[in-house]
Amino acid sequence: MAFISLILAFSFLAIFIRNDHKEYPAFSARLWLPLIWLLLTSTRLLEIAFPVQGAVGASDAVEAYVRGNAMDRGVSAVLICLGLWALGKSKFNIAALIKDNAWLFLLHFYAFISIGWSDFPGISLKRWVRVFGSLIMALLVMVDDDYREAFEHIFRRYAAICLTLSVVLIRFYPRFGFVTGVMGTRSWAGVATHKNELAILCAFSLLFFIWRILKPKSGSRVYDIIGIFLAIYLLIRAGSATAGVASLIGLFMLFSMTLMKYNLKKVIIFTVILSFTIFFISTIFLKQSDADLAGNLYRAAGRDPTLTGRVPIWQFLLKLGSKKLVTGSGYESFWPANLAKVWARFAASPNNAHNGYLDVLLNLGIIGLIVLLILIVKSLIRLGGMGQMSSAHGRIVFVFFIIILLRNISESSMLNPSLSWFLFLLCSIRVGGSLREASAS
């Protein structure tokens, strides 16, 4: 039965992709590169196909972190080379590209030079190459002749593949569909690396497929309805409060912007204020853990007042990183140096800060965090004020961007090859007139 379910799943996906190609025949071979890259960096599909022994203790985790996955590195290197070749064939204007996205390139450049003071330069370089690969693949999408359609159909295929295979793995291949934490707890993961990653995948997919149905002239809606049911089913069973709240906020924004086409300014202002208010409260709460206001807020979201133990971890991490707060420990080098200390202190054995902004602070320091925040503010201003804000594409991009910002308060995906970071890149890359003209020429 398990093998039959797998055959049925791949048959469904083949029909789905064929239908999607009929809807967007211009989906070129070049666009398969970002799709494959996204599947590689945000799922366990390669690991499931070619299993490797996982780490058990803190010392093993550090060793595994240093060693990495040779097959993953090999496939990534091939995809990056193909991506660079495809970008070269597109004949875009590199000077115009850097000028239009100066802060984004500055963030990647600063992450690169931080390898110079990293205690683990080998790890930093390997990880930087992967995050640079995500930038290359995002640029491939954005220099496409119709980047809006490319964005839509890459994510549509990605969501269909991940949701379908996740259901099959969980129901018929539990060895791969579930992950076991350090404390022995089993949770739904599907093709994702963790239940929280599965949940945020479902949240993005749910919002995307609903947006497709609300969008005029979006082609066949049958497959989108199937996608909605799969996303809801997996989202509920994954049991992530963060993704659940993110879905509700995203649905509110999506319906508000769809119904209030001529009052978008009010929706945008309210959403931005809400986002930064939540971020501000969480920051204050980090210093004053007994604040009743923050406690009530987190209880309302279905969490305990310490965000499931996150606040004590944040406080401990800030203490560990206090000596290098200005420049940071170097890109992706804080955790190899401190993983054993953190695991000895906390039974949950976290391998990231569960806060994307804090992870950037620990790795790239105040300098890197400021660059990231400037990029975020400039992107928010552009997304909220661009002429296409009243368009369907503008709405889903703005919703995705806000969800990513909110999610990084309690999860970590900034400058980390993942679905959230790839979407962040697609939302923040500016397709200016100079770049678009250069690409078109």
Image: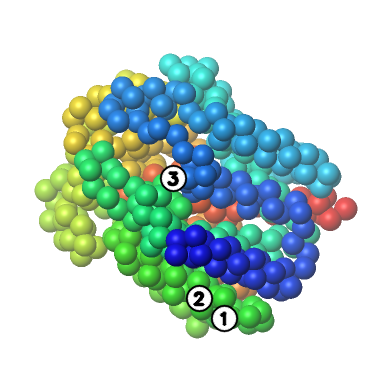
* Residue 250 in picture, x, y percent from top left: 43, 68
Residue 146 visible somewhere in the drawing: yes
Q: Within 10 angstroms of label 1, few (less than 14), some, or many (20 or more) residues?
A: few
Q: Within 10 angstroms of label 2, few (less than 14), some, or many (20 or more) residues?
A: few
Q: Mark 1 points at which residue?
A: 222
Q: Residue placed at 33% from the left, 35% from the top?
A: 351
* Residue 315 in picture, x, y percent from top left: 22, 35
Q: Helix or strand or loop: what does disc 3 sit on?
A: loop
Disc 2, disc 1: CB below 8 Å?
yes
**Horizontal side of residue 102 vs 145, given as left or right:** left
Residue 378 visible somewhere in the drawing: no
Number of numbered discs visible in the structure rendering: 3
Q: Name the residue under label 2.
A: 226
The N terminus - image quarter: bottom left
| Numbered disc in front, either 3 or 2 | 2
Q: Which mark is residue 413?
A: 3
Q: Which of 71 and 197 is in front in this view?
A: 71
Task: Give the amino acid at mark 1.
Answer: Val
Q: Helix or strand or loop: what does disc 1 sit on?
A: helix
Is 71 located above or below residue 294 in the figure? above
Q: In which quarter of the image is residue 18?
A: bottom right
Residues at marks 1 and 3, CA–CA distance in whole angstroms? 32 Å
Residues at marks 2 and 1, CA–CA distance in whole angstroms? 6 Å
Task: Give the amino acid at mark 3.
Answer: Ser
**Mark 1 / mark 3, whichever is N-terminal:** 1
* Residue 308 in picture, x, y percent from top left: 21, 49
| Numbered disc in front, either 1 or 3 | 1
Q: Helix or strand or loop: what does disc 2 sit on?
A: helix
* Residue 303 in picture, x, y percent from top left: 20, 57
Task: Give the amino acid at mark 2.
Answer: Ile
Q: Residue placed at 48% from the left, 45% from the top?
A: 48
**Horizontal side of residue 299 vs 257, given as left or right:** left
